[in-house]
Amino acid sequence: MNGTSSNPRAVKPTAAKLRVVSGTRSDAGEQLYAAQPKIYPREVKGRFARLRLIAACALLGLFYLMPWVQWQGRQAVLFDLPARKFYIFGLTFFPQDFFLLTWLLVIAALSLFFFTALAGRLWCGYACPQTVWTEAFVWMERWTEGTRQQRMKLDRGPWTFEKVLRKSAKQTLWLTFALYTGVTFVGYFSAIRELVPNLFTASLGTWETFWVLFYGFATYGNAGYMREQVCKYMCPYARFQGAMFDRNTLIISYDEARGEPRGSRARGADYRAAGLGDCVDCTLCVQVCPTGIDIRKGLQLECIACAACIDACDSVMDRMQYPRGLIRYSTENAMQGKPTRIVRPRTVIYAILLVGLITGFATAVAHRELVEIDVLRDRNALYRHVEGRLIENVYSVRFVNKDTRAHQMTLSVEGLPGAVIDSEQELHTVGPGAVVTVPIRIRVAEQTVSGGVDVSIIARSAEENAIESRTQTRFIAPVASPGGRP
Amino acid sequence: MPAATEERPAERRWIRFRTDLGILLWASFLAACLATMVFFAYFDPVLLGRDEAPPAWLQDRMTAYTVGFFFFWAIGAIASFLTAWLIDTRSSADQDAP
């Protein structure tokens, strides 16, 4: 099987953008439903392979170690769903802070646009979890089943003892790794230092078990079998990234002018005299490609910019003693001998928006109300007459302390002259990250109020640089009749 | 030649169905993730415990989140399926219209 025939989905260089637009089942679309031949990416060494390795190790390390990091006596990063609190180092977030999460997602999306406009599919090639986990699963495949040639031979061959042994070794590694990935994932939502011991004593909760298996299975399927099919058929980003590309975007490109006409030749032969370009047509660039495309056909929708073909081609160029870079990171402009502009309206606009959003986000986080209050009116009685010709309303006040230390809060009321607050204690202690609900009664003299009045309830912490938080509620009294007390 | 032309139509239909199903489930999965996140940010399942009406087992937050997620996924999958099916089965005259 040579490289060119193994790629039934070759498209024209300009097709990437066209295909993004034409999502319907045209003739070209029919090819989407062709059975995919299994791709055996060939192992590759080189600058970019090293870079990918470093990125993958750093990101996997971050994912697997982060839940074990402690901060002030608790898990540093914990999205405690049962308690509805998110801890990120010194910060505690509550559902009330949901807009911050939305904001963060907008920042993430815009960063993706920015980096795509600058450097193409940098995300896909180096940082996307799909790529990173696929890489880890491919490592395990190589340890157990060997190189590309060995794997192809093994799959073609009969089920010998060695094949069973190698395949089951691979499955054992994959399954263990996938399950532990599931455990780590759940460890972000439920304290991992309890989760892992519970796992070994088989006392995991029902839903924890379920999500460990669910996420583990997703990892196993996506990284073990689906791999780059996910990028081709499932990834929404892959479909719209073309819209962020322009002639100054860094893409992986084959230098057609230099390479063509391609053809094999003896080493040291005067190939120029024979009318040949620099491409020796070894098809290594096709063999290393995880998506199974031929980069020499130009920019394609499937290319995830992993740069494996650059490393492969450079190694051949070195052996042939030709200059490197027949396949290289370049821009459409550079390929045509025009200058590449990094600073251009698109990148400037993205950068300004990004800086603005990040500054806004930091300000919003820094100026969060550290203690919030909510006030709920008691639903059972609108009001009560109490001794001393007073009207009383009952509320429950909920303090939400987002700070990392406890606060002593006092309450006061505004908008109702002469009103007093009566509760069990004067000072309400709210622990760090705690939610405390206390009942209070507001009383006011009968003659000063008639009907409903809007009042503000203010919580103030008893310390220097007091935290102040206020909320509106309604005080309800009987409508005063001209004849006095009804 | 693409491998597809060499396959029997039934096999091809099956491959096509499988791919469509994958896309359908995946799109509704993404929508369900978003829906679960936004919905449960504003709604605390514990509140269900205050009234007598809802099933008691939904009061547990983890249960409610999980059930909610799969509910959103199922609804999304139904919408995806209907969309795909209606687009697929509309008359060819409509498809060719500008």
Image (cartoon, helix red, strand yellow):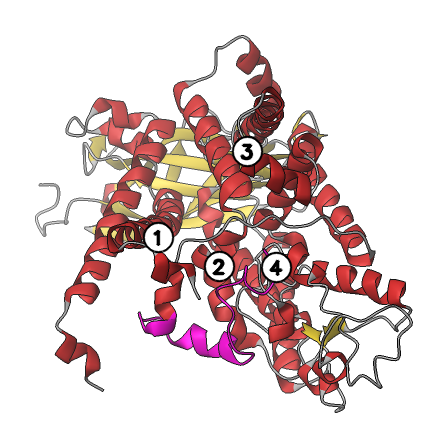
Residue at image mark 3: A185
Q: Secondary structure at mark 4?
A: loop
- Separation of disc 4 and disc 1 at Cα? 27 Å
Q: CA distance from mark 2 to mark 4?
A: 22 Å
Give the letter of the chain under mark 1: B
| Residue at image point 19% right, 57% down | B82
Confirm whether circles 2 and 4 share one chain. yes
What is the span of residues highlighted in magenta in the rendered image?
A1-28
Whole-number angstrom distance, CA of label 1 to CA of label 3: 28 Å
Labelled pair 1, 3 in contact (Cβ < 8 Å): no
Percent of width and height locating residue A205: 43, 18
- The disc placed on residue A2 is 4
Q: Position of residue A372 (x, y in %)?
A: 49, 44
| Numbered circle sitting on residue B19 | 1
Proximity of marks 3 and 4: CB atoms separated by less than 8 Å: no
Left-right relation of B86 to A33: left
Please give the chain letter of the residue carrying mark 4. Answer: A
- Residue ID at (52%, 48%): A38
Amino acid found under the numbered disc labelled 1? Thr
The residue type indicated by label 4 comes to: Asn
**Which numbered disc flags the more N-terminal residue, 3 or 4?**
4
Q: Residues within 10 Å of mark 4 (few under 14, many from 20)?
A: few
Find out whether residue A277 is within the magenta segment.
no
Looking at the image, is mark 1 or mark 3 nearer the viewer? 1
Type of amino acid at the residue the image marks with label 2: Lys
Disc 3 marks which amino acid?
Phe
The residue that disc 2 covers is A232
Q: Chain of mark 2?
A: A
Quarter of the image that includes the C terminus of chain A: top left
Q: Residues within 10 Å of mark 1 (few under 14, many from 20)?
A: some
Q: Nearer the viewer, residue A184 or A1?
A: A1
